[in-house]
């Protein structure tokens, strides 16, 4: 509907709240012999161009008016503003921990920004520049070098030490991303904690908005946002409040660049070094939520995620994904069991979570990505290779789905 296509849907389901029969789409009723379905199909096929155009226009407007970003945002804000008390409780659907905020003495309102660094001298300056532009200036920056071996990256690190007095540089032997994040978190002196990878960037308002959320809702432990890809992609990645059961099927939030209450991360969010191939940040979010430390996603693009060949995320394939999802499910088996029936329903309806794609991708490419003849090509770079994509799109013109 959102792209103006004629939709025929069953009368059983929530989509009936959006589709206006014969105005913005078509709805058929189930019967024993399927006569109603055939009738609606025939009526759609008999539409003239004028009717098709009118229904398409109505469909686009209907989706925008009922599910548009502004509509949903305004409805949520109206509801949240009605929640009483000075320290508001965010309305999560799963059990939330009752916190003692004086567990550790931290510098009041200080934000500790942790940057894990390994051979990324080419990009680190952009990251630091984005932090410098932040509207939340009560911060310390801890750059943790995980035993860099690239000469130019080491030179850049020395240069930063001489030209950025506000950046504290710590060097340690190479032990991996998980251990490096934990190492930095243990050094943090701030009440709040934020991670950002050494090739990514943040928008100036991100940290300030995230800390405002943490200070407003006492039952929120971490805050994320939407992501803007840059480098080898320009898509937008929307994130969502990471609540079960959906969280246990797919990572719903920008877990590598969250803003936390430091105490809560140190209690339940530390990265697991067993996650050798990645997803250590996803595992961290699951562990926090499992233990009652909940998070939310600000529905704004406030974080910039670099897509580049050679990064850990871009080396994922079907085998490493399977291994990591299996490891996560085993580690949190009791939590998964609690939502087992709902997880099964989600998987039956949508397929494996590791195959979920960016919802912001265009319909044409989504159609391409879901073609069974090409799925095996996707992990090997089809998404990132313009030449292969052109070949594949031309190929699809000559085959049926």
Image: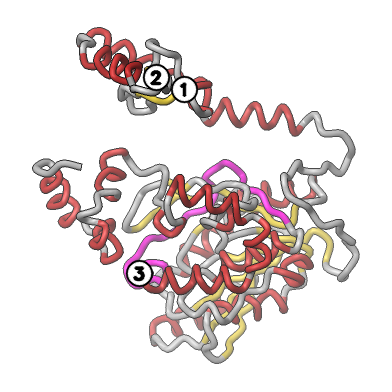
Task: Decide if residue 342 is on the left or right side of residue 213.
Answer: left
Asked if one can make out residue 139 in the rendered structure from this viewpoint, the answer is: no
Q: Is residue 28 above or below residue 157?
A: above
Q: Residues within 10 Å of mark 3 (few under 14, many from 20)?
A: some
Q: Of residues 303 and 97, which is closer to you in this image?
A: 97
Q: Earlier in the sequence, mark 2 or mark 3?
A: 2
Circle 1 residues within 10 Å: few <14, some 14–19, many ≥20: some
- Determine the image quadrant of residue 169: bottom right
Q: Which numbered dot is residue 11? A: 1
Q: CA distance from mark 1 to mark 2?
A: 6 Å
Sooner in the amino-acid sequence: mark 1 or mark 2 = 1
Question: Does residue 216 belong to the magenta stretch?
Answer: no
Asked if one can make out residue 201 in the rendered structure from this viewpoint, the answer is yes
Magenta extent:
294-317
Q: Quadrant of residue 149?
A: bottom left
Cβ atoms at labels 1 and 2 below 8 Å apart: yes
Q: Verify CB contact (< 8 Å) between mark 3 and mark 1.
A: no
Q: Nearer the viewer, residue 309 or 17?
A: 17
Position of residue 285 measured from the top left corner of the image (x, y, whole percent)? 63, 62
Where is mark 3, residue-wise? 317
| Of residues 364 and 332, the one drawn nearer to the viewer in this rendering | 332
Label 1 residue SS: loop
Q: Residue at x 31, y 38 (%)?
A: 363
Q: How is the image coloured?
A: secondary structure
Residue 238 is left or right of residue 223, and the answer is left
Q: Position of residue 100 (x, y in %)?
A: 89, 61
Above or below, comparing residue 9 to residue 338 in the picture: above
The residue beneath circle 2 is 28
Circle 3 SS class = loop
Residue 49 or residue 223, whichever sits in front: 49
Q: In x, y percent, where is residue 389?
A: 19, 52
């Amino acid at each position: 509907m959102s792209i103006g296509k004629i939709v025929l849907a069953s009368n059983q389901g929530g989509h009936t709240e959006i589709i206006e029969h014969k105005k913005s789409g078509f709805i058929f009723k189930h019967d024993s012999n399927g006569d109603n379905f055939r009738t609606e199909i025939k009526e759609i096929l008999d539409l003239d161009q004028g009717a098709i155009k009118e229904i398409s226009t109505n469909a686009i407007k209907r989706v925008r008016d009922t599910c548009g970003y502004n509509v949903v945002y305004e409805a949520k804000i109206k509801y949240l503003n009605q929640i009483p008390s000075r320290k508001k409780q965010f309305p999560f659907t799963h059990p939330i921990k009752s916190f003692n905020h004086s567990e550790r003495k931290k510098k009041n309102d200080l934000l500790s920004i942790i940057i894990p660094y390994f051979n990324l001298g080419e990009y680190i300056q952009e990251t630091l520049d984005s932090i410098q532009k932040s509207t939340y200036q009560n911060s310390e920056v801890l750059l943790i070098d995980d035993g860099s071996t690239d000469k130019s990256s080491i030179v850049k690190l020395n240069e930063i030490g001489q030209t950025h007095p506000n950046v504290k540089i710590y060097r340690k032997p190479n032990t991996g991303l998980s251990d490096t994040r934990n190492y930095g978190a243990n050094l943090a002196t701030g009440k709040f904690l934020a991670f950002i990878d050494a090739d990514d960037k943040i928008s100036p308002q991100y940290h300030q908005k995230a800390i405002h959320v943490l200070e407003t809702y006492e039952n929120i432990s971490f805050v994320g946002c939407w992501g803007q890809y840059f480098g080898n992609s320009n898509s937008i990645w929307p994130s969502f409040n990471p609540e079960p059961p959906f969280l246990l099927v797919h990572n719903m939030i920008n877990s590598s660049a969250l803003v936390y209450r430091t105490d809560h991360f140190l209690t339940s969010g530390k990265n697991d070094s067993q996650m050798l191939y990645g997803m250590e940040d996803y595992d961290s979010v699951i562990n926090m939520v499992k233990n009652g430390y909940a998070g939310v996603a600000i529905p704004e693009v406030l974080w910039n995620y670099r897509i580049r060949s050679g990064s850990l995320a871009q080396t994922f394939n079907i085998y490493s994904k399977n291994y990591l999802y299996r490891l996560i499910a085993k580690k949190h088996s009791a939590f998964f069991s609690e939502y087992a029936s709902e997880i099964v329903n989600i998987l039956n309806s949508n397929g494996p979570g590791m195959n979920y794609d960016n919802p912001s991708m265009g319909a044409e490419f989504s159609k391409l990505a879901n073609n069974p003849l090409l799925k095996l090509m996707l992990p090997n770079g089809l998404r990132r290779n313009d030449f292969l994509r052109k070949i594949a799109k031309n190929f699809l013109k000559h085959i049926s789905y």
